[in-house]
Structures are given as structure tokens and as C-alpha cells.
């Protein structure tokens, strides 16, 4: 098993950034902080693991899903504590419409980093696609608490509100 102390430190360092993100006053500020958070979360502490993450992400960008899954599975096999590796693997599975494995990878990501708003957003999207509106609504709500100014999440909450909360008469 591969130990990733740098990844743990990067995750801890992102705590202050998460507080800044929650207090962001506008979308531009939130986007800037979010990019800084993802930069921190993407630091595994290993050049080899960082390369696997890069190769997996690059493959996803050009829709080479099978290749992405291979790279990212190798990453999570060698660095199971690296939350961002699990998140990237979940994206690859989602792109391949393999929702069960995607949800499993998201659960691993959240076990390593419960504040991972990208993983929470993935959980919400899968629940919504599977017709679990209440679970999707709860996950989207948590995303918005961590990451304000997400128009897509706000739209999803509005879309699901009537189904989850009912319609007022």
C-alpha cells in the first residue's frame, strides 16, 4: 500500500480555502477559490501517482473512457487514501454510464475527504438519474453549503423541490 502524507497535508491545507469558499461573496471569487482547492486536492505527494491522475484526466477529456478507467484504477489501487483519485475514477465510470462503480468510487472519495463537493455533486447527479429525488436533493443541498454560486446545483434544487417538498396549496 502506498502512503500519501502529502495528500493528507494538502487536504488539511484546503480547510482554510473551504472556509473562504463558503464565505465567497460572488461567483468569480468562488470560482477562483474552487480552482485553488482542486489544485490542493490534486497533490498526491508522488510523481508517479500524479502522472496516473494526469493521464486519466487527459483520457477523459478526449473521451477515451476505457483508458481513463485503467489509469485511474491503477491510481486508486496504489494510492487508496487519495480522494481525488477516487473522484476522477468516478467521473470516468460516470462517463461510461457505469453508475454503480461510479457511486462506489464517490463513496471512497467522500470517506477520504467528506468536504469533497465535487464528489457530493456526483452523488447527487447519480441519485437524480436513478430517480432518488430526495437523496439527490439532500446531496445537492450539501454541495451548495460548501460551494455557493453553483447555478447548476441551484437549478437542480429548484427542479427537485416540488417533488421532494411537495407543492404548497
Image (tube, helix red, strand yellow):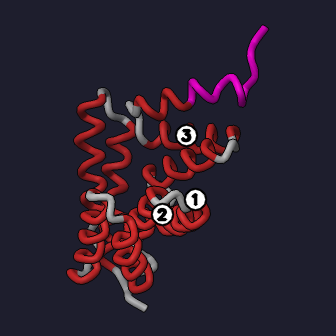
Rendered residue at 53%/62% (across/down) = 102
Q: Which residue is mark 3?
A: 140
The Cα atoms of the two marked residues, 3 and 1, are separated by 17 Å
Rendered residue at 48%/29% (across/down) = 154
Image coordinates for residue 27, horizontal then vertical, percent: 30, 30
Q: Is residue 120 left or right of residue 22?
A: right
Do the residues bearing badges 1 and 2 touch, measured as CB atoms within 8 Å?
yes
Q: How many marks?
A: 3
Q: Which residue is mark 1?
A: 99
Q: Which residues are magenta?
A: 157-169
Q: Which residue is mark 2?
A: 93
The label nearer to you, 2 versus 3, is: 2
Specify the quadrant of the image occupied by residue 78: bottom left
Marked residue nearer the N-terminal end (1 or 2):
2
Image coordinates for residue 41, horizontal then vertical, percent: 32, 62
Q: Secondary structure at mark 2?
A: helix
Quarter occupied by the N terminus: bottom left
The label nearer to you, 3 versus 1, is: 1
Rendered residue at 35%/69% (across/down) = 68
Image coordinates for residue 141, horizontal then vertical, percent: 56, 37
Amino acid at each position: 500500500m502506498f502512503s500519501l502524507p502529502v495528500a493528507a497535508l494538502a487536504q488539511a491545507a484546503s480547510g482554510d480555502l473551504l472556509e473562504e469558499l463558503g464565505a465567497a461573496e460572488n461567483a468569480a471569487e468562488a470560482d477562483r477559490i474552487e480552482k485553488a482547492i482542486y489544485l490542493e486536492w490534486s497533490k498526491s505527494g508522488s510523481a508517479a501517482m500524479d502522472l496516473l491522475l494526469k493521464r486519466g484526466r487527459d483520457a477523459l477529456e478526449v473521451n477515451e473512457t476505457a483508458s481513463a478507467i485503467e489509469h485511474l484504477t491503477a491510481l486508486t489501487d496504489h494510492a487508496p487514501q487519495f480522494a481525488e483519485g477516487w473522484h476522477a475514477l468516478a467521473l470516468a465510470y460516470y462517463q461510461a454510464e457505469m453508475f454503480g462503480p461510479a457511486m462506489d468510487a464517490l463513496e471512497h472519495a467522500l470517506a477520504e475527504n467528506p468536504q469533497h463537493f465535487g464528489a457530493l455533486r456526483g452523488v447527487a447527479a447519480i441519485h437524480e438519474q436513478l430517480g432518488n429525488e430526495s437523496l439527490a436533493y439532500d446531496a445537492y443541498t450539501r454541495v451548495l453549503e460548501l460551494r455557493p454560486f453553483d447555478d447548476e446545483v441551484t437549478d437542480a434544487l429548484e427542479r427537485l423541490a416540488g417533488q421532494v417538498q411537495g407543492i404548497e396549496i
